[in-house]
Image: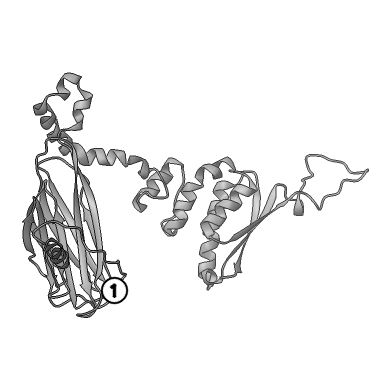
Amino acid sequence: MAEQTEQENLSTAYTLATRGVTAQPAKRTSLPSIPRGPEVEVALVADFHRRFPGEALFLFVRLQPSVNLPICGLEVRIPEGLLLVDCDCLDGDGPTRPNTRSIEGEFYLSFDFEGGVVPGMSYEYVLETIVQPAPGDRNVEVGAVVLARTVADGPVIRDEESLAIAVSAKGNYTRYLPSLYTRDELMGRFLMLFESFWSPVSQQIRQMPYYFDPTVTPADMLPWLASWLDLTLDPEWPEAQRRALLKAARRLYQKRGTARGLQEYLEIYTGGQVQIIEHRANNFVVGSLAELSDSIALGRNNRPHTFTVIVHLPGHLLADEGRTAHWQQRIAAIIDSEKPVHTTYTLRVEAGED
């Protein structure tokens, strides 16, 4: 008789096989072993993962099928310690109000998709909860599970996800006070208010280092970072090139005024291949009867300290003369700002491979 009751509990854990409606047995039991499939995916996130008693916590649940599922049910478990306030449908034509029930202090919300779910559609819900008082620090775990069938008598498909919310019984600011106050429950709860108010500011301060990282900082911050390094970022540059230049700025400054530094700078900017040829007076020969004086200059064509820059750009960037002239002006501006002041150069922009 006991074995029959347990079997009934397991078979009614989710009654998708009969009605497509999630159902919880009168007693908590482990779910039957059902392999996960790629046909449906459930996602569960929270707006915060650390809360104090009395604070609001919003849970977001999203159901995304990849195939047509005429039988589908979703269940969300709200553990003891969270008080459900409201539930709202954000996206999709699924049920707006779930069936609810309480079992052993936990709250279950069951969404029965009577018309099934279709691929390409997203079904999203938001659950508003309030964190309840706790005698001590603890973690509350929220779970979401979806069970479905592609046909009435087909195998059950499932997916599930859970997350843990850290609930602090008192504020952490007490650790900055003498130990006498750490044992005072009233002081701990009183400081918890201020910690809650200042939490967004503290979070921004903790994330401050990321604003100085060219890899992850917001795109709007790139010109500000460049100003620290006396760099001017062309707003027409692709974002990836602007980030690459900022990442290489320290290395480029160490090579500033050298052919290698200029070549690397131009390759980052253009995304093409750059060749720099320095003319070291290879055409000048000193014989036994030669006389050197201030009127003689060493270098090709009697021009000392000269070099040639050859830039190979993809052909589509040089589709017409106007665009070619535009690129030449921008590249020449970079060379003028980076080369030694006493040097002169010749610039050639050529079409390379796309």
Q: In the image, is 287 to the left or to the right of 60?
A: right
Look at 53% across and 53% down and name the residue there: 333
The quadrant of the rendering that contains the N terminus is: bottom left
Which residue position holds label 1?
A: 66
Q: Can residue 25 be seen in this view?
A: yes
Identify the element where label 1 is drawn. loop
Front-most of residues 146 and 119: 146
Front in this rendered view, residue 294 or 249: 249
Residue type (three-letter) at the residue carrying disc 1:
Ser
Q: Please tell me whether residue 347 is drawn above or below residue 185 in the rendered image.
A: below
> Where residue 313 appears, x then y in whole percent?
57, 65
- The residue at the point 6 percent across, 56 percent down is 102
Q: In this view, does 259 lie above or below 137?
A: below
Q: Residue 116, located in which quarter of the rendered image?
A: bottom left
- Structural crowding at the residue carrying mark 1, measured as other residues with C-alpha within 10 Å and reported as few (<14), some (14–19) or many (≥20): some
Query: Residue 319: percent from the left, percent from the top?
Result: 53, 73
* Image height of 127 relative to 50, above or below: below
In the image, taking residue 92 as reference, residue 319 lies left or right, namely: right
User: Residue 263: where, in percent of width, then height?
Assistant: 60, 52
- Towards the viewer: 216 or 80: 80
Q: In this view, does 287 lie above or below 327?
A: above
Looking at the rendered image, the quarter that the C terminus falls into is bottom right
Q: How many labels does the image show?
A: 1
